[in-house]
Image (cartoon, grey):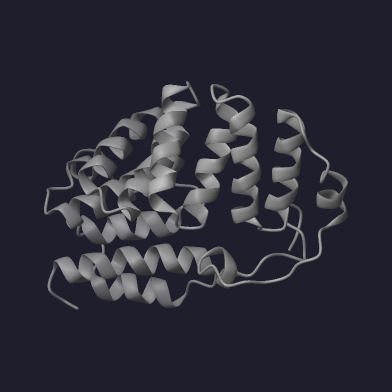
Amino acid sequence: MGLYFDDRHAPAENQLGGKPYYMRDSEQVASHRAAKTYDELMELAAALNRQLRYREAAEVYSQAVELDPERPDAIRQRAARYLATLQREKAVADFERSLELGCERADTLYRLGIAYYLNGQYEQCMAAEAEAFPLFDEEMGIAAMYWNTLAALKAGREPELMKQSYYVGMKVGHHTAYDAVMMLATDHATMEETLQKLEAVNEDLEYAMMGYGTAMIARQRGLD
């Protein structure tokens, strides 16, 4: 799969749906199987992450947490694996605990906001993303704005963050999907123009984020 992930990796059907599968350990995983200390367990979990074995990694992070419940590293990493495998309530609890333990605030708030959103806690999502927004540059700020806006639509609230802070030409970097949705939401682009952009997207994640946000706005406008 490239630099960050092993070519042999766990299937989505297991990580998201819990279906059983068998996978031979990579050399890196195998070399850390005897892990006992906190740092050794963190290395084992990182090796499992490279194989996209997030559920197993979360279990290993839990062993590390048992060794030192006040050390935030394993809790913050476990939160991300819970979020990636859609274990929403566990992700919320771990991200909240990560903040209490002093983890980097902007990114933790942002991911907590996503966990809140997926857990149906839309007011909390709006608050978390609104707090994260001014801590970011515009490239990440547009991402926080995206989730804040969708949460506002879900909650039947006005997307005040978007109305106050969005402008055409924000320095969004590679987050063009979020920007396209915000352009639509602020009437700087029509639905037809946005759908044409969507048809031209080739990258799966970008297509999913742009498509989901576009669908949410279409539903809010009674176009579904």
71 versus 213 height, above or below:
above
Left or right, 198 with respect to 128, comes to: right
Asked whether residue 96 is in view, the answer is yes
Percent x, y of residue 71: 58, 23
184 versus 28 height, above or below:
below
Q: Residue sitting at 28 percent across and 70 percent down?
A: 215
Percent x, y of residue 175: 46, 52
Percent x, y of residue 78: 55, 42
The quarter of the picture where the N terminus appears is: bottom right
Left or right, 180 with respect to 174, comes to: left
Left or right, 121 with respect to 158, comes to: right
| 219 vs 91, nearest the viewer | 91
**In the figure, residue 91 lies in which quadrant?**
top left
Q: Residue sitting at 51 percent across and 54 percent down?
A: 84
121 versus 212 height, above or below:
above
Q: Residue sitting at 71 percent across and 29 percent down?
A: 38
Percent x, y of residue 110: 40, 39
The quarter of the picture where the C terminus appears is: bottom left
How many numbered markers are drawn? Answer: 0
**In the figure, residue 222 lies in which quadrant?**
bottom left
